[in-house]
Amino acid sequence: MEVVLDILIPTLGRPHDIPKVIESLEANTNISHRAIFIPTAGDDADIEALTACGAEFMVHEEPAGRANFARKINWAYERTDAEWVFQGATDLRFHPGWDKVALRVAERSGKRVIGTNDSHNPQVKRGMQSTHTLIARSYIEEYGGLDNTGKVFSEAYDHQYVDLEFCELARKRNEWAFAKQAIVEHLHPHWGLAEEGETYKKAMRSTASDYRLYMSRMGHRSPRARDRVRKRKART
């Protein structure tokens, strides 16, 4: 059977999450798919957990430094070939039928970037972005490599805002649709659903600089700059 969907899941230092995400993914994913995990070389605990679960994985040989998430997705994308790609994570809970709902939205809308609902992030619930996204390979082939730092995601960021930039660009290109009923719950410490371990701390370490980079790349003004503009206008 032809694989329709490649589910790419970077891992880093969270072996306890691996059996849970595999269980929810396989119980609730209906279309033909490959779930491919991407551990870092030397992360023995994750590799042992993946082996014990019988999961398919590809070991990423680069150290888990800057842009680890984006680099792993880009690297795995180049080594897969399904029509659709889903960018996952180990801290997810897949809900029944998420994949069919997302693909139905894609078919009806004609869009090639489909946001899933993580159930907690306010911007996601408003349909403005997605933390975990279904992407047509044809979209990446047409638009990928925006800044020559990665086929799918920009590797200019340390970690934060890379998904927000990706979704915002898809909206500007009229390629975005939000699948509200395609629920892929993000079990993140922000929502009190996980402990803040070292992997989460690594992800949050450059939030301020990633935010400034995002604002600059997207041509946005910061709230402080917008206030200055409003005050100047009020004086004229």
Image: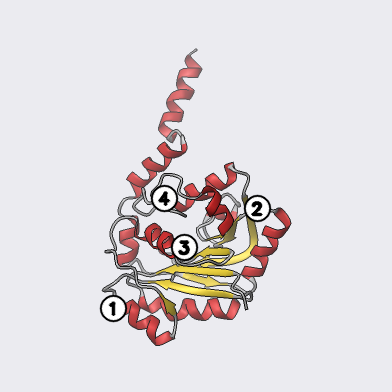
- Residue 138 appears at what percent x and percent y? 58, 56
Task: Of the two numbered discs 3 and 4 on the same chain, state the one appearing first in sequence.
Answer: 3
Kind of element beneath mark 1: helix
Instruction: Inspect the image, locate mark 4, and give the three-letter code of the amino acid beneath it.
Output: Ser
Question: Alpha-carbon distance for marks 4 and 2?
Answer: 21 Å
Number of the label disc, if any, that sits on residue 111: 2
Task: Of the two numbered discs 1 and 3 on the same chain, state the one appearing first in sequence.
Answer: 1
Badge 3 density bin: few <14, some 14–19, many ≥20, Cα 10 Å: many
Task: Of the two numbered discs 3 and 2 on the same chain, state the one appearing first in sequence.
Answer: 3
Badge 4 density bin: few <14, some 14–19, many ≥20, Cα 10 Å: many
Badge 1 density bin: few <14, some 14–19, many ≥20, Cα 10 Å: few
- Residue 103 appears at what percent x and percent y? 66, 64
Left/right of residue 109 with respect to residue 126 in the rendered view: right
Pointer 3: what residue?
Answer: 77
Task: Of the two numbered discs 1 and 4 on the same chain, state the one appearing first in sequence.
Answer: 1
Disc 1 and disc 3 in contact, CB within 8 angstroms: no
Number of numbered discs on residues: 4
Instruction: Inspect the image, locate mark 1, and give the three-letter code of the amino acid beneath it.
Output: Asp
Task: Of the two numbered discs 4 and 2 on the same chain, state the one appearing first in sequence.
Answer: 2
Badge 2 density bin: few <14, some 14–19, many ≥20, Cα 10 Å: many
Question: Alpha-carbon distance for marks 1 and 3?
Answer: 23 Å
Instruction: Inspect the image, locate mark 2, and give the three-letter code of the amino acid beneath it.
Output: Lys
Q: Quadrant of the N terminus?
A: bottom right
Kind of element beneath mark 3: helix
Indicate how the structure is coloured in the image: secondary structure
Number of the label disc, if any, that sits on residue 44: 1
Question: Alpha-carbon distance for marks 3 and 2?
Answer: 20 Å
Instruction: Inspect the image, locate mark 3, and give the three-letter code of the amino acid beneath it.
Output: Tyr
Closer to us: 160 or 166 = 166
